[in-house]
Image (tube, rainbow, N blue to C red):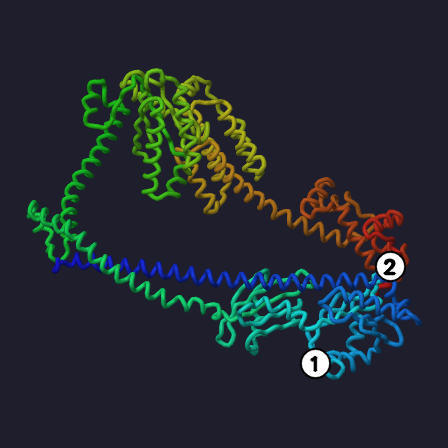
Amino acid sequence: MIKSQRFYRYLLSYILLTVISLLIMSGVVYKQFLSTLRSEVEHSTINSLDQFRLAIDQRILEMDRMAMQISSNAQLKPFKATSHGYGPYEAIEELKQYLSTNMFISDIIIRYNGRNPEQLYAASGTYDVDLFFEDIFQFKNWDQYEFVKMSNTLNAPLMRPMDTVQYNHIVNERYATYSVPLIASSDTPYGVVMFLINESAFQKLATNVLGEYNGTLYVLDHQGTVLYEYTKGNHVSGLLNATLDTIRSHNGAWNITSLEHNKDHYTTVKHDSDRRGYSYVAVMPSDQIMHKVNQARLLFNLTAAVIFLVGVILAIALSVHNYKPLQKLIGVISNQNQAVQRSSGTSRAKDELDFISNAVVQMAKENEGLIHQLHRQAIVLRDQVLLSLITGKFKSREEWEDNLQFSSLRMDGPHFAVLLFLIDNYQTFRRDNSDSMQDHLKRSLIKILEELSEEGGRGFGVELIDGRSIVFLFNLYEGYDKDEVLHDFAMKTKQILQQYFRFTVTTGIGSIGNDITSISQSFIEASHAARYRLIKGEDQVIFYCDIEQDSARERWYPVETVEQLIRAIRQGDSKAVVEAVHKAFGQITEKKMPIDAAEFICFDIVNNSAKTLIELDIDLDEVTNEALERLFVPHLETIEELERLVTDICCNVCRFVASKKESKNVVLLHQLKDYIHDQYTNQSISLESIAKHFGISPSYATRFFKDHTGDSLMRYIDGMRMDQAKQLLTTTDLKLKDILDEVGYVDSTNFIRKFKKNEGVTPIQYRNIMNSDI
């Protein structure tokens, strides 16, 4: 044990486990403790700040309500308060009553706009504006001129920042002012009521926010101006700017974040108010909330050290306890298998587990090779026997039973049927999947088929040599020898493929037989049924008994449709080509022809189309050539695919033919436009004269011109005349009659009607409007 490396590995692993567990536990406990304490402080500050916000919002709401009551108080109307006699006295008494109901406000002052001389009416008395601001309340950063200007223009409540005020030239105090416009019935302010608020009123509410911690509390308006600031502890220079930068950088609603200023870390708490858009912000040093943690840290470290020592003692005990069984196992292996010990080449004195592992691996390799070889041979033998049975190499049940004992195939039912599953769109299947994925998908399909067959018997599947076909032998139990059973089996397979796979199959189903000698015939029938995918399309279930009668049908060939297709190609008529191709291939499906006849007709349609392309001596592009080569592949997927390929190729040729015709039409279009530009002012020009000039019919002339320009010939001429008439109306002094002669109009009434319809005004009105704009 002293010399063993494994023993010391055990010991070190247990010690390391103890250390890791202790570190994890310590980290989790310490982090949880710190997080809990920080969370409690943050939530306490958030709640305190929210209470401060609610208190200030409530005071502002009360002042708004008081201002509304003052505006509706008859004793405080301008004509009443400013009248001689008892009016001012009664106004002061009313203001005193309002002041007595609110301990937050120091004084209430009213100014009425447009009154001369300027008088202020307050709960403390009446004052001249100059006297009030120069002797009674002398603001450091505000004077009577700014107050009067504010009063005249104020249309919404306004809170000014806290300012130093010298009261009666003796006492210096700090006040904030909250001004509310007095709104008359016409919603036009006729004055302003100003509430004086002493700093002590704010401070009574603010002291509870920070609690036992140092920090600073700000009240900010929507522009970031500090309305009130309360600091507990030392004032930090530049903290306000850092706080404002933090607020700007955090868009949206938030309650708490952190900031760094002068290498110190601070916790910032913010609440936004719906009243006037004010923000309430508390900033505290982050490290002051950690002093409680430091008190418990020493005790925590001592406890961790004791736990570590106990863990080391337990690690030694566990190492000794776990090493003894390993030591006994080494002895057993060494005594029982000396050859394995020599071949491993590992000294058990260095690492006992390596010695055991090498011995076990060597024995496992010997057994694994044998098992793998047997498994592969069993699969190959099973597939060979199954293919031999399906292709009819076993002529009797006795011959089959002789080979059955060498395979895993077991046939318990009295009935047999063969199904052929043909992968649709096989080229796409190979392109989208690697070789290994293709094998995996095919094996998965065979496994699904074998599991589904257990409902009515037992089934076995094998892949054919073409790679796209899976043949399935269905051994049916007594009472399940019905076509409905095979149809339900094929439909369930189809549903599973639609749900879990990315490819479909066409299923050909042969007849049900009662002897193994009928299996090969059922396989031939299933293969023939699957060929009908060309007519019936992909993802179909096709029974041989349903298509057997087609072979007796009358033979037919779409002579007229093929001739129509050839004519359409030569004429470059894409629409006629699409109709002819669709009709030709549609007739093959409608006639329900035998598969060999359908394949012959399809090949002949392709051959005649290709022959026509060669006769036209057209140089096809690379894409069309590739598509043409695909037409001669012996086994196309479906009629629809063949129809699509033929249509695309023939339409490309039609566009080429049409483009040659179009090049000739461009010359005629230019000649028509040039002739019209020269003759449109001629009053005798007409559709017939133009057609006669170019030797074409009037109907063809107007149809040709409209196809290329979107306008008929006469409408195009009328537009040119109208444009020239507008030009003459705005640039000359010609009379309307002369303008009509210039542009080719004969009927002035018809011209005026068309002009007003197009421009919305008469020609003379149009001239006046355009000349007035100039």
Q: Is residue 193 left or right of residue 617?
A: right
SS at mark 1 in the image: strand
Q: Looking at the picture, which amino acid does disc 2 mark?
A: Arg
The percent coordinates of residue 695 (x first, y second) are 71, 43
Q: Nearer the viewer, residue 402 or 192?
A: 192
Q: Nearer the viewer, mark 2 or mark 1?
A: 1
In the image, is residue 84 above or below residue 135? above
Left or right: 91 as drawn, with respect to 527: right
Which quadrant of the structure image shows residue 202?
bottom right
Q: Position of residue 480 (x, y in %)?
A: 36, 18
Q: Which mark is residue 399?
A: none
How crowded pointer 2 is (Cα within 10 Å; few <14, some 14-19, many 20+) is rated as: some
Disc 1: which residue: 172
Residue shown at 53%/30% (left/top)? 563
Pick the residue in front: 718 or 92: 92
Residue, disc 2: 767
At which x and y percent is residue 560?
54, 27
Mark 1 crowdedness (10 Å alpha carbons): few <14, some 14-19, many ≥20: some
* Horizontal and vertical percent position of residue 29: 39, 59
Query: Which residue does the image show at 54% across and 44% down from the upper left?
Result: 656
Residue type, mark 1 in image? Asn
